[in-house]
Amino acid sequence: MNSFEANFDGLVGPTHNYAGLSIGNVASKLSANDISSPKSAALQGIAKMKALHDMGMTQGVFAPQERPDILSLRRLGFSGTDANVLEQAHKEAPNVLSACFSASSMWTANSSTVSPSGDTHDGKIHFTPANLTNKFHRSLEPEITGNILKAVFNDEKHFNHHLHLNENDHFGDEGAANHTRLCNNYGEQGVEIFTFGKYAFNSAKPAPKKFPARQTLEASQAVARLHGLGDDNVVYVQQNPDVIDQGVFHNDVISVGNQNVLFYHEQAFLNTDKFLAEVQSKFGSDDVHFIKVSTDEVSLQDCVQTYLFNTQIITLNDGPNGKEMAIIAPKHCYHNPKVKAYLDRLVTLNTPIKQVKYFDVNESMKNGGGPACLRLRVAMTENELAAVNQNCIMSDALYGNLEAWINKHYRDQLSFDDLRDPNLLVESRTALDELTQLLNLGSVYHFQQV
Ligand SMILES: N=C(N)NCCC[C@H](NC(=O)CCC(=O)O)C(=O)O
C-alpha cells in the first residue's frame, strides 16, 4: 500500500504577537515588543501550505488555540467580566497577559510526538501531545492540542491518542521538535530518534549552563513506551549542551531527517560517532545519507540566524531511479551568502537532496519558528489518510476559504496595548468558532463548551 508523509501546519492565530517569552530562543528575545502582523503571519503560513499542496504533498491544517486564555487568567486570580480580567492583568501582570495571548501553537512541531503505524506495537498511529512545561505560555497548550488531534485523527481503528506527560520539568516534553524518524518507505518500520537536552534524575550528567534544556531523556523514554516502540527501532541521543547555550533550544534548529537522510551540524550531538553507528545499525541498510555540515562551512551563529536546519526535507519522487528530495527553507537562508553558497553546493552532491525552495515566513521567524517548526509530520498509508478528517486537508477550495477567513477576521497590526481590548477577544472567538465549522472540528475550545 502507498505510504507518504503528510505535514500538518499550524494556522497562525489572530493574536500573534512578539512578547519575548522564550528565554534561550534568541529571535523571541530580539523581537520582544515589536509590532506584529497577525494577518501577514497567517497569510504567510497558508502560502507555504498551498505551495506544498501544489508540489503534490499531502498538506494538513492544524487549528490554533483559543487565545486569550481567559480561563488561565481567572485561575491566576483575575476576576470580573472578561473585560475586567484583561484590564487588571494588563495593569498588574503584563507578562502573564502576553503569555495568555501567545499564538505559539502555530509551531505544531511542538504540539505532539507522532509514531507511525509501521513502528508501533498495535499497528496504529500514536499521538502524545507535548506538555511544554518549560515555558508558561506554552504549557497552556496540551489540553486543547489533544482535543484538536482527536478531532483531526478521529478514528480509533487507526489512531491511538495518549494524554500528555505529567506536567513537571522532570518530564519536560517538546514533542516532534526533538524527534525525527529515518526509514526507507514511510509505511515500513523505521528508526525513531529522540534527542534530549538533559537527564532529569541525574545532575552529574552533562547539561547546559546558561539556557534551559527543555526536553528530558525521561520524557522521551516515556513517549517511546506509550507508543509501544521496540528497542530495536529507537535511538536516544543527547544534544550538545554547548549549542543549547548558544541558542539552539530545540534539536530541529540543528538537525533534520527524512527517510534515509539525516542532515545535521557537526556540533549538534554529544558522542556523534557512537550515535551515528547505532542509527546505521538499527536502520539495517547502507543506503543512508548522513549529511554533516561543519563549523567551517556554516557557523553555529549562522545556523541560529538563518534556521538552515529548521528546514523541511520533503520527498518529491521515490521511484526506480531513487529518491529525490527538496529542502523547504526560510528566505533568511537565501539572504545569508555563506548559507546560500552551502545550499547551492549541497544540491550538486551525491545525496537525494536536489532542490531548495525558499519561503517568506518572517512573522514566525521573528519568534524563533522556521518552516520545520510550523509543521507536524504524520507518516501514513492511503487507508489512514482516508480516515483523517478531510476538512483539514489542504485543497484549492480550502486555501480560498482560509484566505477569505483570515482577511475577514485578522488585524493588520498588534502591539502590547491592544491586548487589553475586549474586542480582540470577541474577534478571536468569532474567528475560531467559524474556523471549527470550516474544518469540521466540533467544539474543541473551552468557550464553545460553556
Ligand atoms: N523549533 C521549534 N520546533 N519551534 C519553535 C518554537 C518557537 C517558540 N517561540 C515562542 O514561543 C516565542 C513567543 C514570544 O516570545 O512571543 C518557542 O520558543 O517555543
Image (cartoon, helix red, strand yellow):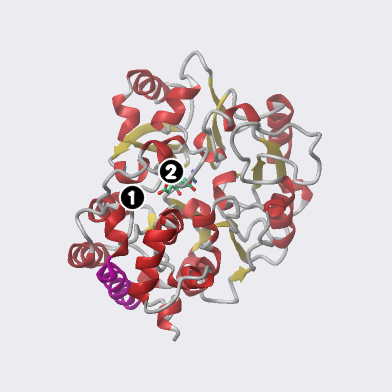
Q: Which residues are magenta?
A: 421-438
Judge by depth and name the residue closer to the eye, 387 or 171: 171
- Disc 2 target residue: 314
Q: Nearer the viewer, residue 280 or 84?
A: 84
- Asked if labels 2 and 1 touch by Cβ distance under 8 angstroms, the answer is yes
Mark 1 element type? helix
Q: How far across and down, in percent of the image, does residue 1 sit? A: 53, 60
Label 2 amino acid? Ile
Q: Is 298 left or right of 221, judged from the image as shown?
A: left
Q: Position of residue 319 (x, y in %)?
A: 46, 43
Q: Could you tell me if residue 326 is visible in this image?
A: no
Is residue 429 in the magenta section? Answer: yes
- Main secondary-structure element of the magenta-colored stretch: helix
Measure how far apart labels 1 and 2 are at the Cα level.
9 Å
Which labelled disc corresponds to residue 52?
1
For the point 60% across and 33% down, which residue is it? 287
Count of residue discs: 2
Residue 115: image quadrant is bottom right
In this view, the residue farthest toward the front is 92
Name the amino acid, label 1.
Leu
The percent coordinates of residue 387 (x first, y second) are: 49, 73
Q: Residue at x 36, y 33 (%)?
A: 355
Q: Quadrant of the C terminus?
A: bottom left
Ligand 1 contact, mark 2 (Cβ < 8 Å): no
Considering only vertical position in the picture, is 430 above or below 18?
below
Tell me what residue is drawn at x 80 percent, y 46 percent: 201
Q: SS at mark 2?
A: strand
